[in-house]
Every structure is written in C-alpha cells, then in structure tokens.
Amino acid sequence: MQRLRRLRRTECLRRAFAETRADVRKLIYPVFVVWGEGRKEEVGSMPGVYRYSVDRLGEVADEMLSAGIAGTMLFGIPKEKDETGSGAYAEDGVVPQAIRFLKAYCAARGKDLLVIADVCLCEYTSHGHCGILEEGDVANDASLPLHARAALAYARAGADMVAPSSMMDGVVAAIRAALDGAGYTHIPVMGYSAKFASAFYGPFRAAADSAPQSGDRKSYQMDFRNGREALRELAADAIEGADVLMVKPALAFLDVVSKARENTRLPLAVYNVSGEYAMVKAAARAGWLDERRVVTEILTAFFRAGADLVITYHALDYAKWGDV
Ligand SMILES: [Zn+2]
C-alpha cells in the first residue's frame, strides 16, 4: 500500500525530504528613510518597523549585516511635498543621501548590502498620486520622464538596482533608456510588474505619508480580481527590459506568483506588504497565533510558489529565529 506518512514519521525524515525552505539570503528588508536628524520612530501600525533619518541608518544597517539578508529596499519621506514630486528626483534628496550613507557605511566595514531604490512619486507629491496630475487624472506619459530622472539620481548615488512601483505603462522602458543613455547599462531594473490596488497597503501609507489626498489608485494599479491580466503586465515589463519581475501584494496573490513562475524565466520577487505584516503582528500580540511558526510558514510559501526574492518586514526577525 502506498503510505505517504512513511516519510513524515520523524523530524529527521521530514527535514531530509523538505522540498523548500525560506532562505535568509534571499530576503530584502524595506527601510523608510525620513528627513531630519536623530530620528528613529516606530510606525504605529507596524510594530518593530521604524522610520530612520539618514544619520541613524547605521543602526538598521548593522542589523541587516548581522542577519545575513540580501539587502534593503529604500523608501523616502521628504520634508516637503509638491505637485510634481520633485523630492523624488532631487540629487540631494533623502533617498540618494541614504544610498550614499549605506554604501559608505558597509564599505567601511568591508561588507556590502544590496541596496534597491524604490522609484515612485507618491511619497513626494502633495496629492499622493504616483504620477503628475492633469485635470485630476494621473498623466501616464508626462510622468515617465520624472520617474526616469528619479531612477537616474538613485543610480548616480550608488544604488545596485532600481524598482519602479508606479504601474505607469512604459515606465520600465523609460527608466532603462535613461540609465543606458547615462552610462548605467549595468544597473538592473526590477519592475513592480503585477502590483494590485490593495487594501493591504494601509499601514505603509501611514509609514510613508503617501495616502492619496483624493480618489484612489485603481486607474493604474491592477484590479485584484484579475489573474490573466497580471500575466500580461508581467510580460509587458519583460518586453520593456525588466531584469526582475515582481508580484505585490504576496499572500492573497500566490496563484499569480505560481502562474508567473510558469510563464517567465526571469527572476521573480514578491512583496510581503505592510498589511500582511500588521495582521500577523496584531494577532501575535493578542496571543492568537504563534508568530514564529506563522512567519516561517508564510515565507516558505512564497518560495514554494516560485519566488526567488522576498521583500518582507519580517526579514530581520526571521533571520534571528531561523526555521521553527
Ligand atoms: Zn507610488
């Protein structure tokens, strides 16, 4: 008789035959960089996650280096916002400063971290949208040069990779052309290829002060009801020259991750977003679930579904715990 339980009998057997494990070396920890000095402020809806001013980034850099994770993805919160999000592409903006600081900090210790710069305008615009507005609507093509300028500013500052998150059509191609034209042919682009308009982003918007002041992002981010369209978005980014594709959010979209894995040979990232993190933290605080076991299960599921890289706020905790 076929007995599938034979290989589950002891922990030694189970470990030997485990098909997947969450790999710490493939985790990216998102970091919020805020203007000012001496600031390290916990995000209320994301316990254990902080906003750092550039001068205090060394603290989280030390944690990331000792955790052995792949690296970080940076988001900036500028002092002032305006209609065109100029803080996103200012050469001395908060993110270029953070990139320079982190690269120098690691180099001084003989180490390195992958520093990925998120590229968008929504943290920098007074209206909170991901592009500039024309007659109340987000203007796609007019916004592309601004995203390209931002990507170039981050590449000049020393970013290892840029990651456009606006879901503007053609943004990957615009950034690729700008990088190539300025001699940054070696800098890869990670597209937020299938990014869904999602209520799971709520805590992030509090952290990044980036909630839209009017309307929502449904005219550019994807409809969560659509799986086939997600494959079209992923294919579009691949054609535009993306080096890495991404699905965001992750937990409620593992079917998309799995299909994406079958449909592309490009590396695939998933973004385990703020709301997914906040749910786990809240339930753990209430004593309703075992945080370590749940996080292990969640991170493992991303790799099982086909992810190569996992962007997650759990990265530092998981690296400390290991599998449980
Ligand atoms: Zn945005």
Image (cartoon, grey):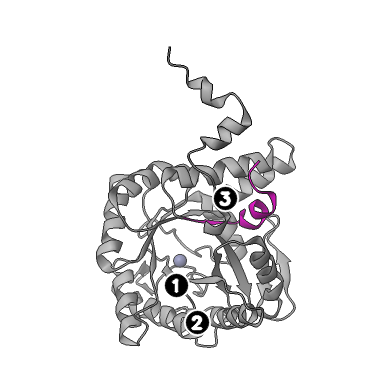
Name the residue type under label 1. Met
Residue 291 drawn at (x, y percent): 68, 42
Query: Observer-nearest residue: 169 or 263?
Result: 263
Distance between mark 3 and mark 1 Cα atoms: 25 Å
In the picture of the structure, the residue carrying the numbered disc 3 is 275
In the picture of the structure, the residue carrying the numbered disc 2 is 158
Q: Nearer the viewer, mark 3 or mark 2?
A: 2
Q: Residues within 10 Å of mark 2 (few under 14, many from 20)?
A: many
Distance between mark 3 and mark 2 Cα atoms: 30 Å
Residue at (56, 73) in percent of width and height: 76
Q: Secondary structure at mark 1?
A: strand
Rendered-image quarter of ligand 1: bottom left
Q: Say which label, 3 or 2, has the lower sequence index.
A: 2
Specify whether residue 116 is painted magenta. Answer: no
Q: Residues within 10 Å of mark 1 (few under 14, many from 20)?
A: many
Residue 276 drawn at (x, y percent): 56, 48
Q: Quadrant of residue 98?
A: bottom right
Label for residue 22? none
Q: Is residue 193 left or right of residue 64?
A: left
Q: Secondary structure at mark 3?
A: helix
Name the residue type under label 2. Gly
Residue at (35, 87) in percent of width and height: 183
Q: Is residue 100 left or right of residue 241?
A: right
Seen from this angle, which residue lies furthest left? Answer: 239
282 to 40, vertically: above or below: above
In the picture of the structure, the residue carrying the numbered disc 1 is 161
317 to 128, vertically: above or below: above
Q: Which residues are magenta?
A: 309-324
